[in-house]
Image (tube, rainbow, N blue to C red):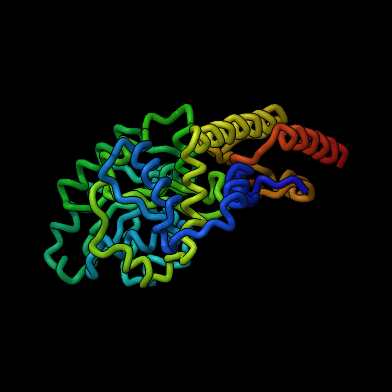
Amino acid sequence: MLSFESDYIQGCHEKILQALAETNYEKEPGYGADRYSLSAAERIRGACDCPEAEVYFISGGTQTNQLTVDTMLDSHEGVLAAKTGHIACHEAGAIEFTGHKVLELPQKDGKLNAADLENYMETFLADGSRDHLVFPGMVYLSQPTEYGTLYSEKELRQIRKLCDRYELKLYIDGARMGYGLASPCNDVTLPILAELCDAFYIGGTKVGALCGEALVFPRKSPKQFITKVKQHGAMLAKGRLIGIQFDTLFQDDLYFTISRHAMTMATEIRDAFEEMGYSFHMPLISNQIFVILTEKQRKTLSRYLRYSFWERLDEDRCVVRLAASWATTEEDIAELRQLLQKCKEEMESC
């Protein structure tokens, strides 16, 4: 069965697999002190044009989000996020598990806007009983969002300005950062993120790595952060496992090359559905394609194609998501076109 269910359903880029194999018997220090992790961190600092940045390699996105929120906030503080944000609805309460509340804000197309943030903060500050409430301490965004949309540089600067006014930290979840950076709709760069964020991470798990994320603190990490990583059970003894992967991804433009490839494949997936008369819930902005299916279309397609169910629009229509990735091939697209034609013929014959 053909699958576009997500962008982490395959292993890793062959250059990463090769690098892991070639270095397998080398003896290197543990816990991220190996030369590959140190080299990868230096490459990422260069890509961010931020020589003072502190870079840490964490095994997965949920751990990275939980660590960052928990170590950057005081015990009485919570994190502001769009109600569709990953930490609000897809991480099994991992943030709340550490004692920090996710404070949900309205969203439009997956994005939190500056006006709603300002309104929330003004309302909070005007509340005479605010000492009995969870204090907002951070703004969480993801780039791209759960709906594949992107924050523009202008939007990020507006949010950063409010963060400065209200003494909030700004953190960006970059699980699919590569695909956002490669989007033709994007005007945000890694140096811009380093300028505007207190912390952000560059996703590897969904962008060519076997596992791992690169957490970047452009100025300074929380006090004794490495110890807190261990307290959270998020420290790999064989830290080289992630260091080698990011050292490979940030050589010879690989991270950006494979991300651009995914965007090309996403466009072809969108075109294949469009040519068959399907409509879309969202315009194509990053690597995620949101297709509207009738119940008949869904039942027919599901026999041949794996995708993610997203939401129901009404009794007869739902939204499903397909994701292109670093590993999507032209052969996958050709097979998709054949399947869509086959499904069309089946539905017409019923």
Quadrant in the picture for residue 189:
top left
Which one is in front, 141 or 188?
A: 188
Query: Which residue is rendered at x = 55% and y = 38% of the image?
Result: 287
Q: Position of residue 255 (x, y in %)?
A: 50, 38
Relative to 335, 202 lies left or right: left
Q: Position of residue 272 (x, y in %)?
A: 69, 31
Query: Which residue is rendered at x = 26% and y = 41% of the image?
Result: 196
Quadrant in the picture for residue 152:
top left
User: Is residue 14 visible to us here?
Assistant: yes
> Number of numbered discs present?
0
Image height of 340 relative to 313, above or below: above
Relative to 132, 190 lies left or right: right
Query: Which residue is rendered at x = 48% and y = 47% of the image?
Result: 246
Relative to 142, 136 lies left or right: left
Relative to 242, 33 lies left or right: left
Q: Position of residue 243 (x, y in %)?
A: 46, 52
Q: Position of residue 237 (x, y in %)?
A: 46, 66
Query: Which residue is rendered at x = 58% and y = 32% of the image?
Result: 261
* Image quadrant occupied by the C terminus: top right
Image height of 255 relative to 60, above or below: above
User: Is residue 320 visible to us here?
Assistant: no
Quadrant in the picture for residue 343:
top right
Which one is in front, 255 or 107?
A: 255
